[in-house]
Each structure stands twice: as C-alpha cells, then as structure tokens.
Image (tube, rainbow, N blue to C red):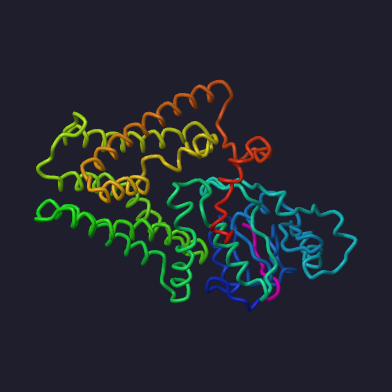
Amino acid sequence: MTAAHIIGQSSLTLWGLTSHARLARQLARIEGVELSSKAPGSLAGNALLIRADYLFEPRTLKGLLQRGGVLMDGDVAAAAAVEASQVEVAQALLRGEATPAADGLSRLGADDLAAFEGDLRLATPPLLERITPSRAGALEDRLYGASYKGITDFVTKWWWPVPAKAAVRVCANRRISPNAVTLAGLFLMLAACWLFFFAGQAPKGEGWLWAGLVPAWLMTFLDTVDGKLARVTVQSSQAGHWLDHGMDILHPPFWYWLWGLSLTPFEPIWGLGFDALLLLTVGGYLAGRLIEAAFHALGSVSLFAWRPFDAYFRLITARRNPCLVILTLCLLVGAPVAGFALVALWTALSSLVMLARLGIAVGSRIRSGPLQSWLADPEASLRHPRAHRTFSSTRRAYGS
C-alpha cells in the first residue's frame, strides 16, 4: 500500500471542488493508494507526496506511481512517488528547498508519462498545471477537455462540447450528481420510445415523430453531460457506469424499431419490406457490438482506436447519433420511411466494414502480436499529422 500525503493548501474551487477534495476523490480511485493523515516524515513504505496547489488528472498520478521519482513542472517539484528512505528529501523538494541528496531522485515531466489514454481514446500529456486564481477559467477548460473523448461520433465531437460544458457547469454549481443526469436521460429515452410508438396510433404520425425526436436529442445531449460531469467532479460510480453504458447499448434498436412500426401501413421501399429492414437494423446493430467486443481480445485497444481509418470511420459509423441525424433529415424532407430504410442499410454496411477491419486485425495479430493503438505511437503526430490533430483530443472541449 502506498501512503499519499497532500502538501500545502489551495482555496481555489474548480468545478465545485477544492484542491484537497479533488485529490482525495482521485486518490480513492487509485488501487493500492491510501490518503494518510500522518506527517510525511512518519510514513513507512512507499509514499506519494502531492502539492495541493497543482492540478492533476488520475492518470497523471497513476503514471507517476508507475515510473517513480519526482514530477517536475519546469524547475518546480509538483509531486513525488518515492520509497520511505526518500520521503524527507522529496518533501524538501516539494517545499522548494534545495538539497544535495535529491540528486539520487529521478525527475520526470508530464511529457515523460504515457500520453495515450485508452478509455477516452485520446493522446495528450497527462494534466499538470499550477493552480492560480488568474487561471481559474483556463484550468476548468483543461479539466473539461481532458474528460472528453478524442475518438467519437461527429455529433459528440463537434456539436456537443460547448453546450455540454455550460450544462456541466450548471450541474456542478447546483450539486446535481452525474447519476441524476443519467436518470433524466433514462426518462427522456423512454419518452422518445413512447412518442415514436404513439406516432403509429395518432392521425398525424409525422407530428408525433417530431415530438419523439425532441427527447431523443435531449437524451443524447445528456449522455455527453453525465460522463463529463462525473469526470470533472470525480464522481464516477460503478452503478452510474453500468446504467449509462447499459442504456447506450440497449435503446438504439428499440428506437429504430418503434420508428418503423409508426409507419403504418408500411410500403416497401427500394424493394425492401418492414421485416427485411428490421432484420438489417437489429442484426447489423448486434453484429457491430459483438465485433467490437471480439476486437478487445486482440490487444489493449478498441476497434475504433486501432488505426486512423477506424477513428475517421467512428465519426460516421451507424451509432445512435449519426442515425438520429439520418432520421431527422429524412423527416425534415417528409420521408420518414426513407429514414428508417437508410438507418437499416447504413447499420448493415457499418457492420460489414467493422467485420472486414476485424479480419485484417486478426491477420495483424497473428503476424505481429497484440495490437496497439496508432495514438500510442510516440511518432503518431509525425506519421499521421492530420489524424493526430483531429483525434488526439477534442480541441473544442478545451475552448479552441
């Protein structure tokens, strides 16, 4: 067990949390680390010393623990992961005191830690910033940007970052929990289901489809808000994770099915009847999810983070948000049947592309061993400059 100790004070509040509160929540989520109330000099065993006037991500602290040594911000020591015999020297460094004994400690910068983060599919140096009142807004931007996926669909990547940040701020200021936002999304998801179904029973079905799109789009927006709120306020929970991801996986085919049921009587389009289109939709959707799950067995990387092509394809692949765009545009031109058909065909085609990528990946795994993401390559910005600029982070989430 590594004993953690927070050194110093910082009264600045970011996303509703003081530095001590944020660090305590972050440390509670790192396995093998326990926040200690003892003085650093009395710690026995491995120790993690952290300055309270610095802003970190959990992956910054995890990276430091893996490497060991002193994490430097230029000439300033911000944190240290050391053995018991090195605690006093490391503590002196963090207080800004010069000590000859510190020569035996390795020094690291944030750039020396792993930039690739698999869960968020981004590749930026872990966060390490000095906390000062004049930079409060910029620091909140950094925290929000660091919580945002680099590889995702085009709606989440380019439409939602700015409005979602405003919603996250409201929730953080009013102490609204991420789980409460997820539950609101669940209610909106069910409301969209009911409205899509009722459209088939109402005299003016298209009007009810429009009504169903309102909670559907609000739900997709809140699906971005709850995850970012959980990360910037360090409130993620296992229950919230399962609820959020369970909703994401289960509801899209039901939306498409109920949309199709509302189009009664259903006239075949492009030679395809309702049953054939429903089979393409549900079968293609399930196949795509299974292909993604199978891909994880090939290495420490998800399908869409393997190669630049996969990242670009993730922008438009037949997931909920791109399919909602298709349904909305088709309804806008008075062609809801075409919307249902296009979602079905695009879902099937997307799964075929993913199946082809899985086959190529299996061959690569056999030839070269476990797969890794192209973003984990230190030369990624040189080998794929445009793709790296696009997918290493979501720049709109940082305010640029």
Q: Which residues are magenta?
A: 1-9
Instruction: Tell me, yes or no, whether the highlighted magenta stretch contains residue 383.
Output: no
Direction right: furthest residue: 100
In the rendered image, residue 225, in percent from the top left (x then y), is placed at 43, 61
Residue pictured at 66% horizontal, 71% vertical: 135
Q: Quadrant of the rendered structure where residue 128 is?
A: bottom right
**The C terminus is located in which quarter?**
bottom right
Q: In the rendered view, does 210 fall on the left or right side of 263?
A: right
Position of 192 with respect to 7 (left or right) is left
Q: Residue at x 85, y 69 (%)?
A: 97
Please say whether residue 7 is one of the residues in the magenta stretch: yes
Residue at the outermost front position: 333
Residue at x-position 45% and y-position 64%: 163
Is the N terminus in the top left, top right, bottom left or bottom right quadrant? bottom right
Q: Main secondary structure of the magenta part?
A: strand
Residue 156: x and y in percent read 44, 52
Residue 177 percent coordinates (x, y): 41, 69
Residue 161 left/right relative to 136: left
- Residue 325 in the image: state x and y as whole percent: 34, 48
Q: Say left or right for 217 vs 267.
A: right
User: Which image quadrant for residue 350?
Assistant: top left
**Closer to us: 158 or 304:** 158
Query: With respect to residue 358, does 91 lie above or below?
Result: below
